[in-house]
Image (cartoon, rainbow, N blue to C red):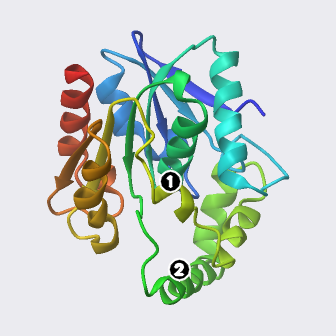
Amino acid sequence: MILHTEVSGSGEVLVFLHTALQTGKTELDLQNEYFKQNYKVVLPDLRGHGKSVAEDFSNYFMNSAKDLSETLDDLNVESAHIAGCSIGGLVALVFAKYYPDKVKSLIISGIIPEKPEDWYELNKEENENIARILENPEAVDYFNSIHKGNWRTVLSSTEDTDWYPFEETADLSMLNMPVLYIVGETNEHETIGALTYPKTNDNIHVSIIPFAGHTAHLDQPEIYNRIVETFLKAE
């Protein structure tokens, strides 16, 4: 499916992929404003988010990568810099693996490289957080206002403990494009990648952002933007 996108600026194409339950427009304003001065910034709504209404959420990351490929084709974009965080980072990673010719460079954050020993407990806690969201009328009204489809179905997909694509995050050795792995220092499960990924692939660069966690682009947007800019200029 072709994703709903917001496009601004001109130059080389830079795609930002949002986190779960958000949209390009609601989450990535600071990145859009910063980078549209020198790049054509593309902000897609991932499958089931925002205005990208969908019914099929099976094989989510592979199908979302296919969505992104079809969307870039629709925009007449042969290749682009791809950046994503959390679910957006997972989609970006899968896209880079299966559509490498369409990726000039890859910037990922909010990624867990290997399955934590306490994964089942972590997933249970996350599902409890989701349940609290669904019980909050203000939160429900907000998500109803920004999503045209059934965002609850997207949320429910994480109830299965096997939803996370660790088979994809475990191995980045085959990536032949420049890769920037960004991690917030406070997330212990994600910082593991800062040590392990560069050992397997010389194309992988690492940046650890202080006073930031899972969403480093939101916790420290100015630092995140400068690091991404430096990386893009170096490549």
Q: x, y percentage for residue 80?
A: 47, 21
Q: Amino acid at mark 2?
A: Glu
Proximity of marks 1 and 2: CB atoms separated by less than 8 Å: no
Q: Which residue is mark 1?
A: 19
Which residue is at a point 68% across and 32% down the rendered structure image?
4
Asked if residue 122 lies left or right of residue 58, the reply is left
Q: Amino acid at mark 1?
A: Thr
How many numbered marks appear?
Answer: 2
Asked if residue 213 lies left or right of residue 123, the reply is left
Label 1 residue SS: loop
Question: From what the image shows, is residue 3 above or below residue 200?
Answer: above
Residue 126 badge: 2
Q: In the current view of this chain or complex, which residue is farthest to the right? A: 55
Q: Can you say which quadrant of the picture contains the N terminus?
A: top right
Which residue is at a point 70% across and 54% down the rendered structure image?
60
Q: Between 217 and 160, which is closer to the camera in this rendering?
A: 160
Question: From what the image shows, is residue 180 above or below residue 231?
Answer: below
Q: x, y percentage for residue 109?
A: 37, 51
Q: Between 70 and 133, which is closer to the camera in this rendering?
A: 70
Q: Can you say which quadrant of the picture contains the C terminus?
A: top left
